[in-house]
Amino acid sequence: MNAQQGSYAAVNGLKMYYEIHGTGRPLVLIHGGGSTITSTFERIIPELAKTHRVIAVEMQAHGRTKDIDRPLSFEQDADDVAALLKQLNISKADFMGFSNGGTTSLQIAIRHPQLVNKLVLASAIYRRDGMQPGFFEGMQQATLSSMPQPLKEAFLKVNPDPIGLQAMFERDVARMIGFKDISDADIKTIQAPTLVINADAEVVRAEHAFSLSRLLAHARLAILPGGHGEYIGEAGAADKNSKLPALVIALIDIFLKE
């Protein structure tokens, strides 16, 4: 995966890394927790970039975007992405967020609705009970050694800083432990057409994705077989040769063209 343009932008005190691939209508990609652009989206960016101007970002403390002295929150991440798009003179875009990036995408749609054309929410949560039982108890005990090895390797490949890796891990754990439900009322304010995607055997409950799709005013729902991120070929996916990412790319293309 070769970036057409890899750059940094000064955003709300952050030196944010982003890449631009392809041409066409803007599509912003927001990675998952503990992740980088590559570890979440490497498998699908080349295909998405054939029909879109893909803007992939790395959020505070993740990958090439260094941490700064402020708490991590989905609301702040949303504001950072909005500020980046303003710098890029993009007044409206499609957004795809995976896992934590999906929750950030929800916050973008709530806080900056004028920016959003369409949303693709992949394994996104808006309520604590959207996670499998025991998830938050497990977070209380989590250590860096329990972080998936492919995610650690992906971080160190683009930012060979073990202290930065530890900081990212601690930031993400603290954010998840402190996660507060997004209200149904806030979700219902989202008017953008939305594609909700989830797997049937992953950390985000398929029932939660169904509930989210029903709360949103204009949503379609796709439940796919497999684990967390397998349907987009995320770095931790067990089957490296799965054909599901090709199916998901086709679903996204059809949805964004509607």
Image (cartoon, rainbow, N blue to C red):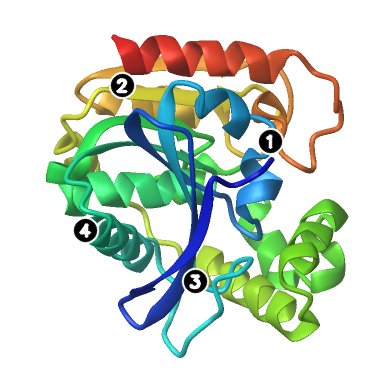
Q: CA distance from mark 4 to mark 1?
A: 32 Å
Q: Nearer the viewer, mark 3 or mark 4?
A: 4
Asked if residue 189 lies left or right of residue 169, the reply is left
Picture quadrant where residue 173 is located: bottom right
Task: Indicate the quadrant containing the N terminus: top left, top right, bottom left or bottom right.
Answer: top right
Asked if residue 52 lies left or right of residue 239, the reply is left
Q: Badge 3 is on which residue?
A: 60
Q: Secondary structure at mark 1?
A: loop
Q: Residues within 10 Å of mark 2 (few under 14, many from 20)?
A: some
| Numbered mark located on residue 86 in the image | 4
Earlier residue among tags 3 and 4: 3
Q: Residue furthest bottom?
A: 69
| Numbered mark located on residue 214 in the image | 2
x and y percentages locating residue 10 in the rendered image: 36, 76
x and y percentages locating residue 101 in the rendered image: 48, 49
Q: CA distance from mark 1 to mark 2?
A: 21 Å
